Amino acid sequence: MDTVETLDVSGKVVLVRVDFNVPLSNGVITDDTRIQAAVPTINTLRDRGAKVVLMSHMGRPKGQVSPEFSLGQIVSGVSKALGTEVGFCKESTGEAPKKAISAMGAGDVLLLENLRFRKEEESGDYSFARELADLGQVYINDAFGTAHRAHASTAVIAQFFTGAKGFGFIMANEIKNVSKVLNSTEKPVTAIVGGAKVSSKITILENLMPVVDKLIIGGGMAYTFFKAMGGSTGDSLVEEDKLQLALATMKLAKEHNVEFILPIDSRNGDGFSPDTPVSISEANEVPRGKMGLDIGPQSESLFSDAILSSRIILWNGPVGVFEFDAFEKGTVAIGKAIVEATQKGAFSLVGGGDSVAAAKKYGFAPKMSYVSTGGGAMLEYLEGKELPGIQAIMS
């Protein structure tokens, strides 16, 4: 696959689709992680003599011009991250950006206004994509977070750049690292899948069955499995209409010779509250009036042992309500085990918003092999779906 390092970009206008959908408070960036992540791609293009034109969305303005979603607010933040002054154009197509681009020199950077100020962006409009394409000579997609959307700037635009399109470092790294899990020849492969509901993770579970040797289930979704097997779940979160699906998932694991690992014990509360009294029970015998909110200490040891014996590790979803201090222990234990396994030579991939948040909260992220920035795109990739933003570059 072509990347910023393999394409001929010297002296050319390179359109780069980035994901600068960053959080703001009174117009000030509160977390510039996404901007920092794009710096290597942008500066590589600059160093190679390109004129870099950045395209992004912010928020959901629904095709309306809205000052609160203007990318003009982040220009200073992008300039600071890149170490160079970044120009800004209040339009994304037409004469204004063309004029601004014509005044650019090699290594200059220009940021266009929020693409979603145009309703044609999200509808994947051909004509709008063509207008954007007319601004440049090379197209780079480095917005993995939107790769699962067939929008004008993420997928449709690529058809106008035959032989002159490729991935930025974020996209290339996401593809490479997820593929390292899904196509692994190293064994054993272990996936830790947590979160609240079986229904939201079932496609991932099904897609992982031919890949993994061990499948660890945690979080609220575990109680649906226990209820399906005839256990007592108290007031724990259970998807009553997914009990047969849970049993079918366990059967599928058996058919693929996957070791299906459920919690042994459960940390319970009297309700969904950070200050509820904590008690411990067997995971399949949660008392009436109690709600399972985290795995217990025996489960921590069981899960950690499985992780430490693995060569490839995927973590998608916390195993408890880590936002509550009393119910963070399981997720912390999982993170520590993954870090230890990584330090001993295992490859670890963390993906999905909540597990990434946990990895960052407890300082685990820098000690893991790869932490995905993709969110929904990462989940769909794990589900085995073809992502439009990737297919458009590969085709």
Image (cartoon, helix red, strand yellow):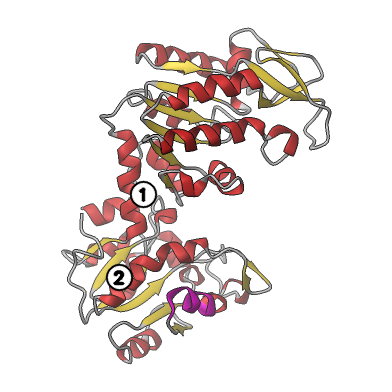
Give the residues drawn in magenta, as a range: 75-83
Q: Is residue 346 above or below residue 14?
A: above
Please tell me in which quadrant of the rendered image residue 87 appears.
bottom left
Q: Residue at x 42, y 41 (%)?
A: 380
Give coordinates of residue 56: x percent, y percent.
44, 68
Pointer 1 residue: 174
Pointer 2 residue: 44
Q: Is residue 213 above or below residue 377?
A: above
Q: Is residue 233 above or below residue 338?
A: above
Mark toward the viewer: 1 or 2 = 2
307 relative position to 176: left or right:
right
First along the sequence among labels 1 and 2: 2
83, 25: nearer the viewer: 83
Give coordinates of residue 291: x percent, y percent.
75, 24
Please tell me in which quadrant of the rendered image residue 31 appears.
bottom right
Q: Residue at x 60, y 45 (%)?
A: 362
- What's the distance in space between the residues labelled 1 and 2, CA to CA? 18 Å
Q: Which quadrant would the N terminus be assigned to in this image? A: bottom left
Please tell me in which quadrant of the rendered image residue 237 appears.
top right
